[in-house]
Amino acid sequence: MHLTLVVPGLLDMAASVLDGIDAAAPALTRLLAAAGPPSVDRDGALAVICAALGIAKQHDWPIAPWLAHAAGIDTTAAYWLCAEPATLTVGRSDVRLSGVVGDLESVETTALLATINAHFAGDGIRFEAPDPARWLVGAVCNAVAIDAAA
C-alpha cells in the first residue's frame, strides 16, 4: 500500500513545535520516521494532490471542475474556475485587492450569489458556492461557427 501524506508548512515549523507534535501524536511521529525523506513540489501542495489523484497538469492544475463535481455540480457544459470573495479598495487612479473575505455566512453568500448570477446570466457565467469560503465559477463556452465560404 502507498500513502501520500500532504502536510503544508510542516517543513517550515520550528523544532520546538515539531517536538510538541512528537509528544501529542506519537503515531504520526512513527509514520513520518518510517517514510523516506520529504519531498517538496515547487508547484505546491495542489500539485502533489493532483498528481496523487492522477489529474494531469494542463496550463495549470485543473482542480475547479473536480471540486465542482465533488460538490454535486454538473460540470459538463461549462469551463470551471476557482473563485474567492474578496474586498477591493478604490483609490483615485486604481483599484487594489484588499484581501480575501473569509467570514461570510450562508445567508450572505446566498444573497451575493443571487445578485452576481443575475448580473452575469446573459454572459453564460454562473457562480456556485458549495461552502461560503469556497466559490466556483462556471463559464459556458459557446462554439462559434465560421462560414469558410464567406
Image (cartoon, helix red, strand yellow):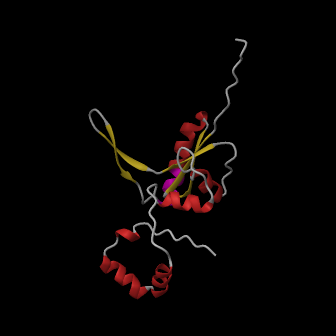
Q: Find residue 94 and report its horizontal and vertical position in percent.
A: 31, 35
Q: Residue furthest left?
A: 92
Q: Find residue 137 and report its horizontal and vertical position in percent.
A: 56, 46
Foreground: 15 or 144? 15
Foreground: 71 or 18? 18
Residue at (30% x, 80% y) in the render? 16
Foreground: 39 or 126? 39
Residue 118 seen in render: yes
Q: Is residue 56 left or right of residue 28?
A: right
> Where's the C terminus, which quadrant?
top right
> Where's the N terminus, which quadrant?
bottom right
Residue at (35% x, 83% y) in the render? 19
Q: Residue furthest front?
A: 36
Q: Find residue 41 and report its horizontal and vertical position in percent.
A: 46, 59
Q: Quadrant of residue 25?
A: bottom left
Residue at (61% x, 73% y) in the render? 2
Residue 132 seen in render: no
Q: Is residue 56 left or right of residue 45?
A: right
Magenta residues span: 105-111
Magenta residue check for 51: no
